[in-house]
Image (spheres, coloured by chain):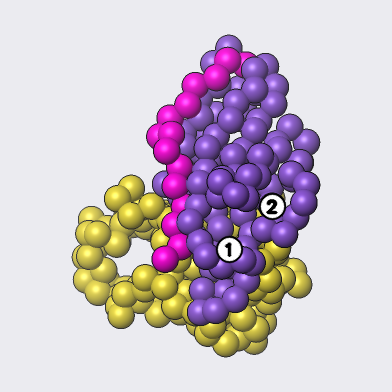
Chain colours: A purple, B yellow
Amino acid sequence: AQKITQTQPGMFVQEKEAVTLDCTYDTSDPSYGLFWYKQPSSGEMIFLIYQGSYDQQNATEGRYSLNFQKARKSANLVISASQLGDSAMYFCAMRFGRGSTLGRLYFGRGTQLTVWP
Amino acid sequence: DSGVTQTPKHLITATGQRVTLRCSPRSGDLSVYWYQQSLDQGLQFLIQYYNGEERAKGNILERFSAQQFPDLHSELNLSSLELGDSALYFCASSVGAGVGQPQHFGDGTRLSIL
């Protein structure tokens, strides 16, 4: 069974500091994609970053980077130089490349990030 | 702006009623997905359509149904509503169902059952 685990219900970081949000996953499927989404208090879901299981390099998108450790089955999100606007719920999600589960996203329970001045 | 449009943004209704949630995917996206977000269940996949055809079903109740029309917009129909159906319902779209294609979400429809 596919499973995504986010062990940090809440994280606090001071503005301008870096923060790492943890995500581990469990699958025996060799082909998969890992995604991070941000959900502000207003409710929308915003796509942040993607990492493929066959990618050799860690993905980066501006201040977001994904620390992908395949052997440990972890895909942690690193936010550099935190801003007050980064305060939100962050979800790790996974998508598989074959089988009946093709296409759908599996989500973790999320981590609530609070950035303080 | 993700390019995915969901209407209405808010819906308040009573138990036993029926509602329809509407979604217009991003231009060029053929796949549409519906998700339900609630405090106790988190984000749950309901159903997927690709170019008008149903492709996958998740935790969708029999009281719920959906369809994707020739113009690719989709509707999620919820009937015989119960208090537990109160949730945020998201529509998402992607070009296809490939592993590397991110799904882009609409702003959601917040359904409140009184």
Tell me if A68 is positioned left or right of B45 in this view: right
**What x and y, as percent, mark residue B103?**
63, 61
* Residue A109 seen anywhere in this rendered image of the structure: yes
Of the image marks 2 and 1, the number of the one nearer the N terminus:
2
Say which mark, if any, is on residue A26.
none
**What x and y, as percent, mark residue B61?**
31, 75
For disc 2, the chain is A
Residue for point 49% across, 68% down: B34
- SS type, badge 1: strand
Tell me if A40 is positioned left or right of A65 in this view: left
Q: CA distance from mark 2 to mark 1?
A: 10 Å
Q: Quadrant of residue B46?
A: bottom left
Residue for point 25% across, 74% down: B80
Say which mark, if any, is on residue A51.
2
Q: Amino acid at mark 2?
A: Gln
Q: Is residue A81 magenta?
A: no
Question: Which part of the image, by quadrant, shows the N terminus of chain A?
Answer: bottom left
Q: Amino acid at mark 1?
A: Arg
**A74 up-or-down from B17: above or below:** above
**What x and y, as percent, mark residue A95?**
58, 63
